[in-house]
Image (cartoon, rainbow, N blue to C red):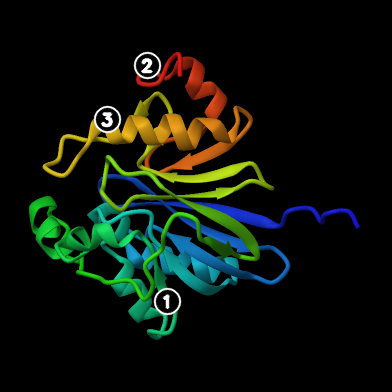
Amino acid sequence: MAQSEPRLRATVIPVTPLQQNCVLFHDDATRRGVVVDPGGDVARIRAAIDEAGVTLERILLTHGHIDHAGGAAELKETLGGTVPIEGPDRRDAPLLDALEEQGRQFGLASARNVRPDRWLEEGETIELAGEPFEILHCPGHAPGHLVYVSRRLRFVIMGDVLFRGSIGRTDFAYGDHDALIDAIRTKILPLGDDVQFLCGHGPGSTIGEERVSNPFIQGS
C-alpha cells in the first residue's frame, strides 16, 4: 500500500521580543496538533490554536531557555491543565527551574518556572499530530537540547542548534562550542542535504544549503 500524503501543517507564531519561532503543528484531517516552544505571548498562541480549530495533544520543548519555554506553564494552565508538557532532556532541568529569574533579567515578567510531565531522551520517538519524529540530543547551546526529526517528511525541528548562516550561541557558563559543532557534524549533517529544517529564530533552510554556505560548518 502506498504511503498517504503528509497532512502535517505548520503555523509559525513569533513570540517574545526575541522573536522566537513558536510553532503550531497540526494534522489537516484530525485537527489534532502540538505546540513547540511556547516562549511567551500565550494569548497569541491560544488565538492561533483557536483559529486553526486544533485540539492540542501536547506541548513540546526543544530546550530550557526563556524564549522557548517561558510560556509553557501558562499555556498548559489556559488549556485546562490536561495537555502534557514533554521535553527537553532532563539535563536542562536547572534552566527550567530558573525561568522566572531569566524573565526578570530579560524583562519578561510572565515567564514561569516549569517541569515537564515527561523528560525525553535520544533514541525515543514522539508522535506529532500523527507523524513520528525521532529524538536527537544535540548539546552545546543548552545541555539538554533536543532536535526532532521526521525522516519520512525530510524535515527537522531544529531549535537553536543550526540556523541559516549561523549556529546556536555557546557563550553561556554551561555553553560548549565544541559539543555543538560535534552534534551538528555527527548527527545533523548526516540526515541528508535535502532535509529542510525550521529553527528557533529567523528563516528555515536545508542541511545542504548550510553545508555549503554556513561559515561555522563549511567543509563538513
Are the residues flagged by discs 1 and 2 in contact, CB closer than 8 Å? no
**Secondary structure category for the residue under label 1:** loop
Q: Quadrant of the N terminus?
A: bottom right
- Badge 1 crowding class, 10 Å Cα cut-off, few under 14, some 14 to 19, many 20 or more, is some
- Give the image location of residue 197, x and y in percent: 52, 39
**Secondary structure category for the residue under label 3:** helix
Residue drawn at (25%, 53%), measured in percent from left and top?
65
Q: Which mark is residue 215?
A: 2
> Between 172 and 178, which is closer to the camera in this rendering?
178
Mark 3 / mark 2, whichever is N-terminal: 3
Q: Is residue 79 above or below residue 95?
A: below
Are the residues flagged by discs 3 and 2 in contact, CB closer than 8 Å? no
Distance of label 1 from label 2 (alpha carbons): 38 Å
- Badge 3 crowding class, 10 Å Cα cut-off, few under 14, some 14 to 19, many 20 or more, is few
Asked whether, in this view, residue 75 is left or right of residue 7, the answer is: left
Q: Which mark is residue 20?
A: none
Mark 3 / mark 1, whichever is N-terminal: 1
- Give the image location of residue 146, x and y in percent: 40, 51
Three-letter amino acid code at the position of disc 3:
Asp
Residue that badge 1 annotates: 84
Residue drawn at (64%, 41%), measured in percent from left and top?
154
**Secondary structure category for the residue under label 2:** loop
Q: Which mark is residue 178?
A: 3
Mark 1 / mark 2, whichever is N-terminal: 1
Distance of label 3 from label 2 (alpha carbons): 15 Å
Three-letter amino acid code at the position of disc 2:
Pro
> Between 11 and 195, which is closer to the camera in this rendering?
195
Three-letter amino acid code at the position of disc 1:
Pro
